[in-house]
Each structure stands twice: as C-alpha cells, then as structure tokens.
Amino acid sequence: MNDKGLLFIPDISGFTDFVSTMEISHSRHIIQELLELIIDSNELSLEVSEVEGDAVLFYKFGELPELSLIYDQVTRMFQSFHSHLTIYEQNRTCHCLACISAINLSLKVITHYGEFTMFQVKHFNQLFGKDVIVAHQLLKNDIDHSEYWLITNGMHKGYPSATFANPVQWHNGAKQTDRGEIPFLYTKLHQVAKIVS
C-alpha cells in the first residue's frame, strides 16, 4: 500500500574523486566512519533504507515533520561530519593522499516529501515509487556549492524562515528531467561549517 513520507538523503560530496584517486584501504575506512557517523546522528527517528556508496537513504512514513526540526537534523549531521573531519585532520599520523585529502570532503542533504512504498527482495527492503526517483534525481543539480540543504517546493509551504531559530536564506532552483521540471529551494550550510572549524 502506498503511503506518504519524508525522504532524507545526506550525500558526501567529493566522494568519486576521493575514492578513484586515493589509497583504497584508507579511503574506505574514512568513508565508512563518516557514513556511520551520519547514521548515528539521526535524531528524527528516520529509518535507513540503504547505504548507497556515498549517501544514506533515510525515510520516515507519516506527516511531514516541522521544517525547523528537519533543519535541526540537517545541522546536527553536518556539524558531526565536520567535527569528525577536523579532529581527524588535527590528529592524523598518516600522510597518504586519502588521509591528507579527507578534510576536503563535504556534505549536502536532499529532502523530499512524497508518496512511496516498500517491497522486499529476499531479506532486503527497497523503497519504491516516483517520489523516490525524484529525490535521487535531485542529487545531481546545478547548484554551484558543495554544501547545502535542498528541499522540494512542497515542503516549504507554510514554513517561513521566521520559524527557524537562526534565519534561513532560501535560494530558488530547478532540476530539468525528461518528465519535466522539479522546482526546489536550497540554503547553503557554510555558516554551520564555520561554527565547527
């Protein structure tokens, strides 16, 4: 049965270059730690559908949580991610390319509220529905910044920036697909990065 819910995808930016040009053993270890950290930072009771290489596909069926709560979740993951990289950079003893370059990794988060369901293949649960496709399409976009929180337009309705503890500056964007345009809003997370650096 189809249901509505939140799709929440933290994605490590710079992953492809990091993995393809660095020592595999150390780059694997660093990415594994960061993905586990993202999962451990989950305080919205999101469920993990799967780990997708450089991203975690979270979901939560039911009503859309308040946008300010989702923002708190985004910033918590973002701060944990960068705090870990900062500590890693300060304390590292290895000088291989993977360990030196880890500090350059960044995080973006895609969130979309829509209709989807689950099905099981053997003992694996898979999310299914057009809105799962929409969320994944938004991972590739024209935003000229590597660290941001993206929401689809439907999520923003009724939640002005004034509802946030810290004002959020939204920017408009759109993703062109073969099925039409997906409008979205995004906010840069560089201010959060400054807090932890």
Image (tube, rainbow, N blue to C red):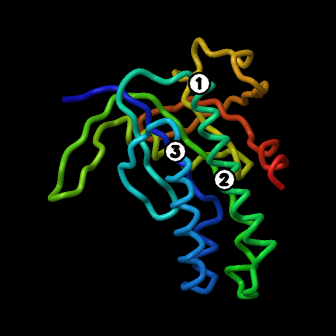
- Along the line of sight, the residue nearer the viewer: 1 or 143: 1
Q: How far apart are marks 1 and 3 (CA)?
A: 15 Å
- Along the line of sight, the residue nearer the viewer: 164 or 53: 164
Residue annotated with mark 2: 80
Q: Pointer 2: residues within 10 angstroms few (<14), some, or many (20+)?
A: some
Q: Quadrant of residue 18?
A: bottom right
Residue type (three-letter) at the residue carrying disc 2: Ser
| Left or right, residue 5 beside residue 176 | left
Residue annotated with mark 1: 67
Tag nearer the camera, 1 or 2: 2
Residue 76 horizontal/vertical position (percent)? 65, 43
Q: Quadrant of the N terminus?
A: top left
- Along the line of sight, the residue nearer the viewer: 69 or 59: 69
First in sequence, mark 1 or 3: give its number: 3
Q: How far apart are marks 1 and 2 (CA)?
A: 20 Å
Residue 29 horizontal/vertical position (percent)? 55, 76
Residue 47 horizontal/vertical position (percent)? 39, 43
Q: Pointer 1: residues within 10 angstroms few (<14), some, or many (20+)?
A: some
Q: Pointer 3: residues within 10 angstroms few (<14), some, or many (20+)?
A: some
First in sequence, mark 1 or 2: give its number: 1
Find residue 42 and name its label. 3
